[in-house]
Image: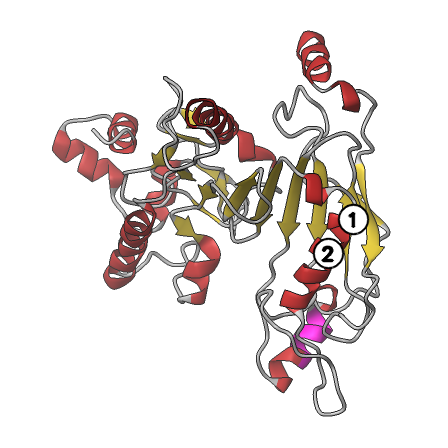
Amino acid sequence: MRQVQNLAQSLYPCSTRRLDQDMKLRFLENSTVTCNDGSPAGYYIRESKGSRRWLVFLEGGWYCFSKENCASRYETMRRLMSSCRWPNTRSGILSPQPEENPHWWNANMVFIPYCSSDVWSGATPKTDQNDYAFMGSLIIQEVIKELLTKGLDNAKVLLLAGSRSLIIIFHYALLSGPVFVVQWLFDEAQLTVDNVHLMGQPVQEDQWRYIQNLGIDLRNTLKNVPAMFAPACLSHEVITRSYWMDIQVKGTSLPRALQCWDRSLHHSLRNHGNSSSHRSPPRGCPLHLIDSCPWPHCNPTCPAIRDQLTGREMNVIQFLTHMGFDVQRMAQQQGLDPNKLLGMLNSGT
């Protein structure tokens, strides 16, 4: 581990000092851009002087759309509508230790708390006629404006991530250029919105078809994306979770996929000048990584799922059985061990 740390630090001579673990709260300079209740919006930041890598994370947290449910939300989830109780510091998004996070350990980290209840899309201030402000899109604009003065204008790589599990990485040119997309094929929040609760009673046949069609539709949507990572997992967040480096698609982890993508861009620039029309990955470095197995958590590297009643961790077979899917019977019909069957399906064979 010490050798890994020394190597990582030698590659980043401008950032050999120990990074502060915590991110510090900064309220927006433009006080007219606010949270729902009129309190100031803001962001948490951990700066890494000398680094040209940036990670900006947009927090999620549903939304409200009427006076009644916004009032209920304010009583039960005030943190998502007001900054009055935000702590002055919060722990970082990713580890600042190079042995734990070799590719992003010294990046500038920014966490934008969600307090607008509008899916980051609103631009309406609080007035005498409006009980709440909905200014999510303006909050993002103001944060980016302030970050530009802190070095974002000179960024080499910007990673924009969020609770929706979509990651878009912009390389060299700010907010333009090549992108890398990360998306769970079975988004837990999307299924909940569509009234499909996988951890309750076994799903009905029409719900099971809907779940499979959701994965199929996402695969079709993403098939022409040149650089992507799409595991067949039931989940909702990626970057803020400790397991983000453990998930694999076809034997490739997300950190490895990001490294390959970064290398492919350098390779492309060397061979084609500034043109980004052709980005073939270096040998042994896949870029288009999408699971082909057809149901949630058929990828054995998916994050653990716990039974909501007992709290016990469930493996893939237990989870699918919990949903009413008879993995054992299907494997028996094929004359296979259940785990071997899952592995074969996951590898596309």
Task: Name the residue at the front extreme.
Answer: 273
Identify the residue shown where x is 59% and y is 47%. Answer: 160
Tell me the number on the disc at residue 149: 1
Q: Is residue 42 visible?
A: yes
Q: Residue at x 81, y 66 (%)?
A: 30
Where in the figure is residue 60, as x and y percent of width and height? 60, 58
Segment tinted magenta in the rendering? 71-76
Q: Residue at x 70, y 77 (%)?
A: 133
Residue 173: quarter of image:
top right
| Residue 197 placement: quadrant | bottom left
* Residue 299 visible from this viewpoint: no
Horizontal side of residue 34 vs 242, given as left or right: right
Q: Which residue is mark 2?
A: 145
Give the quadrant of the N terminus: top right
Pick whichever, 322 or 290, lies toward us: 290
Residue 238 sits inside the magenta stretch = no
Give, as a three-letter code, the residue at label 2. Lys
Q: Main secondary structure of the magenta part?
A: helix
Q: Amino acid at mark 1?
A: Thr
